[in-house]
Image: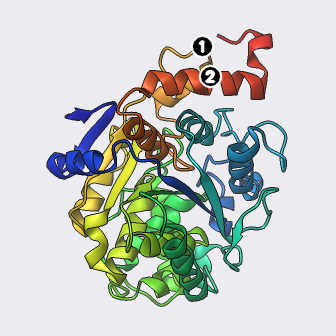
Amino acid sequence: MEKVYDVILARNPPRGRAFINRIAGALPLFLLALGTTDTAKIPSISAAGATPEITDFTPPADAELLYYGRCRCISGVPITPEGIPTPALITRSALRLAGMPSIVAVGGLRVAPSIPFINLGGLPGMDIKTGCAVKDAAEVLEKATIAGDHLTRNSDYVVVGESAPGGTTTALGVLVSMGYDAWGKVSSSMPRNPHKLKRSVVETALTSACLREGSLRNDPLKAISCVGDSMMPAAAGLILGAARNVPVIMAGGTQMAALLAIVNSMNPALAGNLAIGTTRWLIEDGTSDLIGLVSQIADIPVLAADMNFSKSRFAGLQAYERGVVKEGAGAGGSAIAAMAWSHGRITGDALLHEMEAGYESLVGLGKQGER
């Protein structure tokens, strides 16, 4: 695939190259939208936490890591059941190397982060199997749109990431309810993508909400309300407000496809200001199809940060090369922004070096001699 710096032009290379050239040398504002959903507590649906119950702590812990270099609501860092660390470590490394400012916006959490943040007034998301997943989507989206507009009036561009465990299942629900061919196409934080389980959950959710595939094609807010999660109206609003003024990197994997469907349905004129920024691991994932999903929705570029952890000093980071985690907390998009800001001086290897230093400090693996 074509590359600019260490950025893979994964979809529509001409537009991807033009987007990179447009933002090169500019320092963006990084926005992280947080939300929880009880869908994440369904056994085997998500690896964004050592146990399903701990997923309530993952988004606030990710945000605290960005601000303090450590977590306050939990000890250590968010990990998968196999002990693989959060991709927020990548995001923190990109923010540090580029000196990128960041702001956290909360769509709805059960555990608040111990940082300054924008509270959009939302409630935690319910299990989508109830057919009533988010109770205040319209209000949160309106507030987030205002925030996205005001925050970007003096910004060159923005990167919008998310932290929402269970979010690929809710993304599947929104995409299917809006009529997109998404079965078997959303990603997973686990190497073995539980597509059968996700399909069963979404089919139950649609039945509970008295919906059919495609019945909400023109009603994205109802799609969020019935089968989405509390991160979605926050992130979608930030993107809608920001893209009126500046370019936006939608930083994430297949959850960003669902957000693109929402944003494009509400304001298709913004597509020219949008690109999805993810990681190499996500676009090389044979169990999902981000490119195919985006191609159904809008003709925007997909960019991927070319990072390789196979030679890391730490087994926990090497595991990314086996298809664990892949993306999250804006990792890919923030890495791309750092690469573009530095005109390529910040490379995938530089990000790994910075991440290893942070990982060693946080987890103390250096003293344990893990190699």
What is the three-letter code of the residue carrying label 2? Answer: Glu
Residue 180 can be seen, yes or no: no
x then y, percent, for residue 125? 66, 74
Q: Label 2 vs label 1: CA separation?
A: 8 Å
Q: Secondary structure at mark 2?
A: helix
Left or right of 205, for residue 240: left
Residues tagged 2 and 1 counted as in contact (Cβ below 8 A): yes
Query: Is 314 situated above or below 176?
Result: above
x then y, percent, for residue 154? 49, 64
Q: Residue at x 54, y 16 (%)?
A: 312
Query: Is 324 situated above or below 189?
Result: above
Report which residue position mark 2 lands on: 356
Q: Which coloring applies here?
A: rainbow
Marker disc for residue 313: 1
Choose top left, top right, bottom left or bottom right for residue 183. bottom left
Q: Residue at x 25, y 66 (%)?
A: 272
| Crowdedness near tag 2: few (<14), some (14–19) or many (≥20) residues, C-alpha within 10 Å | many
Q: Secondary structure at mark 1?
A: loop
Viewer-closest of 122 and 124 = 122
Q: Residue at x 24, y 42 (%)?
A: 9
| Residue reaching furthest to the front | 154
Q: Residue at x 49, y 14 (%)?
A: 311
Left or right of 59, for residue 152: left
Left or right of 287, for residue 224: right
Residue 8 can be seen, yes or no: yes
Q: Quadrant of the N terminus?
A: top left
x then y, percent, for residue 339? 40, 35
